[in-house]
Image (cartoon, helix red, strand yellow):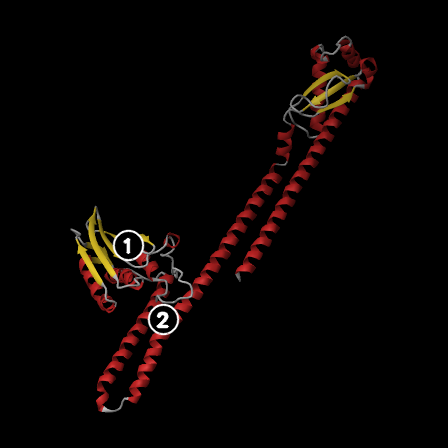
Amino acid sequence: MKKNKRIVFIGFSALALLALLAIQVSWLFNTAQVKEDLFAEKANMVLSKTAQELCANQAMCKRIGDCCADMGEGHCELKLGKAEKQTIDSLLQYFMKVYQFQIPYTFALHQEGMMHHLAANNTPVFKQRIEEIAHLNGLELHLEFPSREKFILQEMGLLFGSSVALIFIVFALFIYTVRALLKEQKVAEQTIAFINNMTHEFKTPLTNIALANKMMGKLVQPENEEKWKKYSAMIVQENEKLQNQVEQVLRLVAFEQGDLKLQMQEINMHAIIEKAIESVQVQIEDRGGVIYKELKANSDVILGDATHVFNVVCNVLDNAIKYSKEAPIITILSFSEPGKFSLSIKDTGCGISAEHQAHVFDKYYRVPTGNVHDTKGFGLGLAYVKNRVEAMGGTVSLSSEYGVGTCFTLYFPLKNG
């Protein structure tokens, strides 16, 4: 998927998700409004039925009327007798049970127009005239529910909780999908870069082998023996390069599949370092460079895989050579730390900018150089270094300054550390 298409896809997906969220939130508010309307309807029904029952009891109505006859602007229920209060309370409880409406409440008797529609805490107050005695003093029964909002939320509990959970799940899946898409795109780009690098790496030795073979076919005279040897050596050298590249690809496959098994044994690190220096000495001399070494570690015996340790050191040295534009100057230093053998390999090459340092150990990653392909490799070496060192219980650190140079430090646990 091209970059522009990917951006459009993510944008439309985000808009669709926001639209879905808006619909879900709107639906929740509408549901809450329905629940609130149903609550109000039940409260009015309870009040209406209670008032009807009170009116049907003329003796009770007379006692209530007598109690409230001189209430003025006061609360009538303060003058009600205990029996009257219990009667009103029991009727309210009964009808709330009938309408499946169990919630804490308070009630009061007031003259009409003596209270605002909302109580002090902005809780709606439900009112009902008691018709039997309203003609005397306009008496109203008021009903208030302090925990009305909490009750409505509890009524919506499962619905509200599942909706919120669904929203979070959809958001999480969206984020996961976008991240997976970006990751797949990155892998695709790395794969394309790897194929391009591999093609370039294989093309050069194959071309040289073909050229040398063609030239050898023309040299049949005995006096051309030196040229025969030269072209023969070229074929051997390029064939070895090609074999090394094939070996790296096979190692990559094993690396991806996790089949790089370790053969742990005691290793003399200084001997491994000397062997690695010897293996790159020709490259150093061809470039007019030099290697300085200071092997100062008091103890250099570790427990590891000799082949992988050798390859690790060679890979770091190879990087130092490749990324030195001038004659490579490399300093190798070994030193001891508590329980560790430390190996520092420093070069005076082009260095790595801060923005790329966090990615140099990623598989296939190569520091961008634009369209110039002047540095060979598959972008696998440092990923292999980090993987193998950590598999043997060690760590790798990087210190670099762009335009100045780079230093890799490898830490291995000592055998008796």
Q: Secondary structure at mark 2?
A: helix
Residue at x 22%, y 57% (from the top left corner)? 332
Residue at x 18%, y 54% (from the top left corner)? 300
The percent coordinates of residue 358 (x first, y second) are 38, 53
Residue positioned most to the right: 135
Residue at x 31%, y 85% (from the top left corner)? 215
Could you tell me the amino acid type at mark 2?
Answer: Glu
The percent coordinates of residue 362 (x first, y second) are 38, 57
Q: Which residue is mark 1?
A: 407
Residue positioned most to the bottom: 221
Could you tell me the amino acid type at mark 1?
Answer: Cys
Q: Which residue is mark 2?
A: 201
Q: Is residue 57 above or below residue 148?
A: above
Q: CA distance from mark 1 to mark 2?
A: 26 Å
The percent coordinates of residue 104 (x first, y second) are 64, 24
Tell which of 79 and 199 is nearer to you.
199
Left or right for 380, reference 122:
left
Residue positioned most to the left: 298
Tell which of 301 and 48 is nearer to you.
301
Circle 2 Cα neighbour tier, 10 Å, few/some/many (<14 / 14–19 / ≥20): some
Left or right for 32, reference 232:
right
Q: Secondary structure at mark 1?
A: strand
Residue 303: quadrant of the picture: bottom left
Left or right for 384, reference 412:
right
The percent coordinates of residue 279 (x first, y second) are 22, 66
Residue at x 72%, y 21% (from the top left corner)? 116
